Image: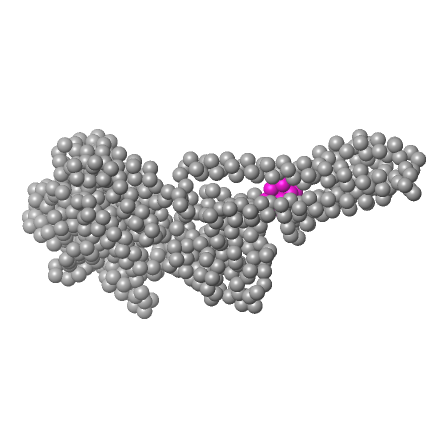
Amino acid sequence: MYLRAGRAGKGNTTVEKEKRNEIIRRWTQRLVLVLLDVCSINLAYYFALYIRMTNNHRLVAGAEVFFATFYRFAPWYTLFCIAVFAFLKLYNGMWRYAGLSDLNRVLMASLITCLFHIVGTAFFIRLMPFTYYALGAVFQLLLICASRFSYRLVTAEVSRINKARNAATVNVMIVGAGENGRRIIRYLEDDLVYRPVCVLDSKSESYGVKLNGIPLVGGMDKAEEAVDGYAVKAVFVADPLLQPELREKLQEVCRSRGIDLINYGPQFYESENLTLSPERPRKSHGDKHIIPFSPPDITEREIGEVVEALRSGWITTGPRTKLLERRLAAYIETGRADVDTEQESGRWSNRVVCLNSATASEELNFRILGIREGDEVIVPAYTYTASASSAVHCGATLKFVDIQKDGDPATHLPEMDYDKLEAAIGPKTKAVVTVDLGGIVCDYDRVFEIVERKRGLFTPLESDGTPLGDLSSRIQKALGRAAVVADSAHALGASRVFRGKKTYCGAIADFTDFSFHAVKNFTTAEGGASTWKPIEGVDNAEIYKFYQLLSLHGQNKDALAKSKGGSWEYDIIGPWYKCNMTDIMAAIGLRQLDRYPGLLERRVEILKKYCAVCDELGISHLVHHVEGMDSSNHLFLIRLPGFSAEQRNSFIEKLVARGVSANVHYKPLPMMTAYRSMGWDIADFPNTYDYYHNLVTLPLHTLLSDEDVDYVCETVKAVYREMRA
């Protein structure tokens, strides 16, 4: 509903039809104006010649010669005028005479065409009387202005009549009383859906004034009063420079009332072809809903911070990235997003590394651990490829483990079968990857019990004499067992009682990676982070330093360090990788983190409705909150009892046909070509396939309104009952 991509409420067929109708309407208008101009141009100069050649109601001798000149030159002059008018864009965008900018274009066009008329007749036929040129130019200007103004009045009246007949007309409040506001008002005159009823202006003295006939409401503090008083159903922000706090207030007013908020950016105002395109976000008014699966929740706070980062001149890894790292460290330890990390910056530094993806984060976790060729890494068969491919990048051998039958008994999470995990650990096992899928936290007490029992099989890495090899060796020796590496891509903010204490993801496993991809609860567009628990005998600052080296070509100074006077020189410690986070990405994350507790709460509200519907239908689903565990509520997985894979696919298609996007998380890795080529076969993982074959993921994100959630619930019930009948 807010900053949503695409148009809600119209199917593809309807959108294409509206596009065609819009094109036909626009070209019809242009053709009418061209015809009016042809008449105006020729009548103007004909009248001018007739008046000039008339004296005491009699034609001056030789007038026939001048009329012959007029007739010979008129076709060429007409074509030239139409070309000039088109060049000055009098037929598109600002084609209607309605303000100074339009009048300026008409004046310029008249001046250019008049000069052409003088030059053309004088050099190619004959020089006409001066008064003929002067009167013709004046008449042409007046007739062109009159035709456009008359046409505007006619179209406005037709639009008013159509809107009066249209029961679905939507009252619009325009925010911003400048030129942009005027332009939107003019372009709404032809729109059969939207009707401007008031303009909200920042100046309180504007009260009682009208803008293009629309009442002005003075003062941004009058937003709620205006929305209620004028029965507003949509708000158009016509001021791209509106202060972020005012924009946030508008969003809250609109969200609380279920009102559309449409932001028109500078590119809209700079366009000469202004139209309210069918592609612009309009929520349905009686039509089918369109529910996207997982759009990013971006507000003016994030946009403003990104703009500030761009203006700062520092856009790659810099102060915002470092601040985000400290704030994430505090959030992971405390569960609070409002910790003042600058008061104790040393406490929160060197504990989280922000990178450009969770995949890069997991791979660097493995490289810090010293995972290499000859080592084995255990991964659940039910996960996304990033959980496994990172180990492959390091040269390790994968060992897939089947999940528990129907998932964990309490949460239904497709969690590893821990008996099979224990059996899979051998002398070459250096890491066990746990996956907190959907934001639900695995049973880490059980995982750590298993790896501790297998200590006797573990042989730590010996240093190869390189700084990184020495660090990895010391880490492995300090652990003395296979490392527990958490793929917590979905689980920022999730927690579990671990060893008797509530602990947040990032502080449970030995090493953890998070994803900040656009579809995640918390986003930096792309991005991710690595974190780790303190390791005895190894300094956090040393670990952090090697993450920095591994993520920046092995260069021992980043751009921020090199920017200090006289500090240009650097060394390359190793021929490593490039996967650092930029300050532009971190800017999004800083403002996302401000809002994150509220985003999680909204997800809980949505989950309650989903759970109630699934329980009513007898559909198994993920349980995100149980005693001792609170999820981050990232995905809502349901399993359709008695459905085959083909029926599951048909269920998804029927949802999509009704406007509800759905997905499957995930197709098991042993079914993928890359892993089948390694010798893995899904037949060896019966629980994994059984869990997958009837699974559907419903849309779960914070841009869903209560109305959207209700629509999803009703659609799921209708489709499920239809297919079970």
Residue 117 visible at all: yes
Side of 323 where 154 appears, left or right: right
Q: Give the range drawn in magenta.
A: 88-95
Corner quadrant of residue 679:
top left
Q: Residue at x 70, y 46 (%)?
A: 146
Figure check: 707 above or below 215: above
User: Predominant secondary structure in magenta?
Assistant: loop
Residue 241 visible at all: no
Q: Residue most toward the front?
A: 165
Q: Residue at x 23, y 40 (%)?
A: 720
Corner quadrant of residue 330:
bottom left
Figure check: 121 above or below 712: above
Residue 589, horizontal then vertical, whole percent:
35, 55
Q: Which residue is drawn at 79% across and 39% down?
A: 45
Residue 347, horizontal then vertical, whole percent:
27, 65
**Which quarter of the rendering shows the C terminus?**
top left
Q: Which of 485 and 171 is in front in this view?
A: 171
